[in-house]
Amino acid sequence: MAKVTLSSDWLAGCAGCHMSMLDMDERLLDILQQVDLRSSPITDLKHPDPEGVTVGVLEGAVANSATEEVARRMRDRSKILVALGDCAVFGGVPAMRNHLCIKAALQRAYIETESTVNGHIPDDPELATMLPQVKAVDQVVPVDAYIPGCPPSADTIHSVLVKLLKGEKPQVPPEKLDWH
Ligand code: SF4
């Protein structure tokens, strides 16, 4: 029988949600034995842009053109798309910049601070373009399952992934949701 395929990626965030996945310890190894892992930033698998993923997991918010492209690509290739962590679910920490004047923030970061390199705002055309507002993943593409928390606990991530990989609808008990 063909294994369920799993792929994960991160957008704008701190990588803490993927670190929490690693906290599943032996349970992560059990999961990896049951799935065909196509790509993930926590493995040596580079991103071969795999097609036909059963469960795609995205951590982080959509903050620029590069993360928007990753989110759209993951949606396109995944049957079920999971938003992992508060940044993916509602914008979280990266979305704090939505309340700032971006021009002033860039000026402060790159020109007015002593740590500035070269004293100018980076304008390399190879760099991703900032979106005017940081967005939750479901503001860009449809999401099928949400795992809130900053980060969600390993137990919570495990319980949702196990259900999804069995083809079941995840129902995390409220006490296991990591609301703060
Ligand atoms: Fe980091 Fe929290 Fe965002 Fe996860 S939800 S990427 S732990 S800031």
Image (cartoon, rainbow, N blue to C red):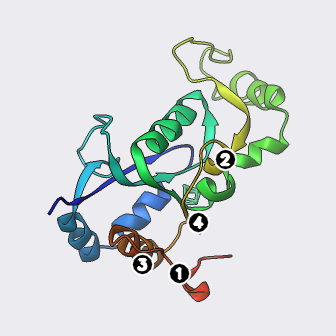
Residue picked out by circle 3: 159
Q: Earlier in the sequence, mark 2 or mark 4?
A: 2
Disc 3 from disc 4: Cα separation? 16 Å
Give the amino acid at mark 2. Answer: Pro
Secondary structure of the residue carrying tag 1 is loop
- Determine which residue is flagged by label 1: 172
Question: Spatial distance from mark 1 to mark 4, Cα to Cα?
Answer: 16 Å
Disc 2 element: helix
Please state which of residues 111 and 103 is positioned toward the viewer in this rendering: 103
Residue 65, compared with residue 80, is above or below; it is above
Query: Is label 3 in contact with label 1 (beta carbons under 8 Å)?
Result: yes
Q: How much space separates mark 2 and mark 3, taking CA atoms? A: 26 Å
| Corner quadrant of residue 87 | bottom right
Q: If the picture is divided into quarters, which one holds ligand 1? A: bottom right
Res 128 → quadrant = top right
What residue is shown with label 2? 94
Name the disc covering residue 150, or none.
4
Pointers 2 and 4 in contact (CB under 8 A)?
no
